[in-house]
Image (cartoon, helix red, strand yellow):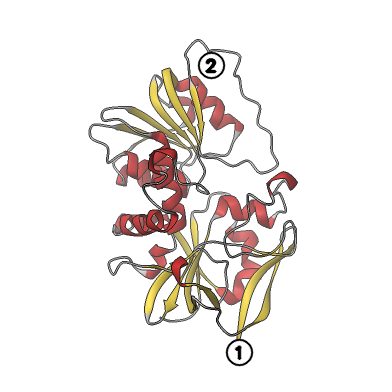
Amino acid sequence: MIEARAFWTTAPGVGELRSETLGDPAPGQVLVRTLASGVSRGTEALVFAGRVPDSQHAAMRAPLMGGDFPFPVKYGYSAVGVADGQRVFVLHPHQDSFRAPANMCIPVPGGVPTQRAVLAANMETALNLAWDAAPLPAERVLVIGAGVVGLLAASLLARIPAAQVTVVDTNPARAALARQFGCDFAFPDAAPGDQELIVHASASEAGLRLALDRAAFEARIVEASWYGDAAPTVPLGEAFHSRRLRLVATQVGAVATPMRGRRSHAERLAIALELLDDARYDALLDGPTRFEDMPEAMPRILAPGGLCHVITYGTE
């Protein structure tokens, strides 16, 4: 038997560390000793605030979470640890040690440092988004929202030959981040128009309205935001029909249609980890914060304006 500790959200804005006993491993399971985990701000902020709608309780379950929505719940999906002497990434909540199916433990490439590897879940989302977006060479691309997923998506789309990618955000500090990934930057009121592919990742009604306003004829708008229990109002009665716009939902729970049946969830996650072999992505990390300090630190970690906050669990 092994004693472990995990972070649980127990009420709106309240978390605590709880102990649990890890029993004997089931067939196919391995023991993982956690080195670091990442806080995915957008989703985890909604979970921490108790804002997961009743209708989405089943859809929002993370693969290895504990408890049930709204509370108490053990939630998270960006853990990096050691299993059988190898560094692995696992879609597991914040916990200092845990058992997991061996087939869910994806090896971390040697060139990817442990703390950067916690971005794998967000990179997997960005990769799936890029598959849904089906970008074309030389397209004019607008990414609205320079959070972690928005910047990761922009970094992938900027690799398309001759693509002109502009990142839009209200935070001037995001300009340097956008440019280091080969993208232009603009504030919302200066966002260019006539854009052929638009990724909306700001999780705001204003951002989605901007996407509709800046879209070119027959443009594709890929909606990457999740609004929780909010209900944004958008002007679908203006030029939406005359410009024949396409509004496409993207979500990481299913492999994007163009690659479904071609890549499994595990293969997609392995690709995401390989893509992180790039030191520029270190700029998307905040922190770190010690695991022991999570209950007091979570309100600060989840405050607006942060990136991917790293939780550490001692030395490697």
Q: In terms of sequence position, does the residue under pointer 1 or pointer 2 come before the other?
A: 1
The answer to whether residue 303 is seen in the rendering is: no
Cα distance in 3D space between marks 1 and 2: 60 Å
Q: Is mark 1 on a helix, strand or loop?
A: loop
Q: Label 1 sits on what residue type? A: Met
Relative to 88, is 228 on the left or the right? right
Tell me what residue is drawn at x 61 percent, y 70 percent: 294
Look at the picture and state if 220 lies above or below 92: above
Which corner quadrant of the image does residue 193 belong to?
Answer: top left
The image position of residue 85, as x and y in percent, is 37, 82
The image position of residue 125, as x and y in percent, is 46, 48
Q: Is mark 2 on a helix, strand or loop?
A: loop
Residue 269 vs residue 238, the one in the foreground? 269
Q: Label 2 sits on what residue type? A: Phe
Q: Residue 1 carries which label?
A: 1
Relative to 29, is 13 on the left or the right? right
Look at the picture and state if 244 lies above or below 173: above
